[in-house]
Amino acid sequence: MTETYWVRIAKDNLVFSAGHFITFAGGTCERVHGHNYRVEAEIFGPLDENHYVVDFIAARDALAQIVGELDHRMLLPTAHPQIDVVADGKEVTAKFEERRWVFPQAECVLLPVPNTTTELLARYVGRRLLDLLQERTGVRPQHLRIAIDENYGQWGVCELRGE
């Protein structure tokens, strides 16, 4: 019999409110709008010498830090081929075709993603969580799943293995 272990973290405080817009094939770009996102994480792995997969407190606190960094911010993609995002130290300007937005830099998070879809936000959060867990515990989980809900039942999920 094979045993598999994982922990799931889904706390009421793992939420963030943020603005964004996404583009679609054919040059369509949404209006700026926002969501109240909820974040959940599942971390898989063998049991350690303490008989747990990961320290719940370390994982919870790392997720809370990431969520805090995204909360009440404008999320902008820096890897989009048609959206130009430029930060000058005070402001961030985003341009898409003839449209242009200017935001205070302190109110933006520039994300290394091609689009601020929920799926890619989940990937970003998952990679940040892996980095923070390694930094805080010395262990980098080899498998995790991040789920982000953008609208009460509309989840984007990213599963990362072997990073």
Image (spheres, rainbow, N blue to C red):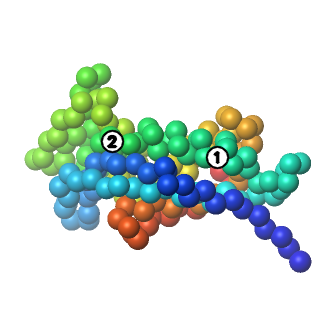
Task: Please give the label number shown on residue 59.
Answer: 1
Q: Secondary structure at mark 2?
A: loop
Residue drawn at x 25%, y 23% as measured from the top left:
90
Residue 118 position within the rendered picture, expressed as x and y whole percent measured from the top left? 40, 59
* Residue kind at label 1, given as amino acid type: Ala
Q: Is residue 101 left or right of residue 69?
A: left
User: Splitting the image into 4 quarters, where does residue 143 fall?
Assistant: bottom right
User: Splitting the image into 4 quarters, where does residue 51 fall?
Assistant: bottom right
Q: Looking at this view, is 50 or 48 the one in front?
A: 50
The residue beneath circle 2 is 72
Q: Looking at this view, is 146 or 63 the one in front?
A: 63
Residue drawn at x 42%, y 62% as measured from the top left:
149
Q: Is residue 109 above or below residue 24?
A: above
Task: Please give the label number shown on residue 88.
Answer: none
Q: Residue furthest bottom?
A: 1
- Which numbered disc, 2 or 1, marks the residue that appears first in the sequence? 1
* Residue kind at label 2, given as amino acid type: His
Q: Looking at this view, is 94 or 131 the one in front?
A: 131
Residue 126 position within the rendered picture, expressed as x and y whole percent measured from the top left? 55, 51
Q: Residue furthest front?
A: 12
Q: Is residue 105 above or below residue 62?
A: above
Number of residues whose C-alpha sits closer than 10 Å to that of mark 2, classed few (under 14), some (14–19) or many (20 or more)? some
Q: Secondary structure at mark 1?
A: helix
Residue drawn at x 78%, y 68% as measured from the top left:
4
Q: CA distance from mark 2 to mark 1?
A: 22 Å
Residue 157 position within the rendered picture, expressed as x and y whole percent measured from the top left? 50, 64
Query: Number of marks in the image?
Result: 2
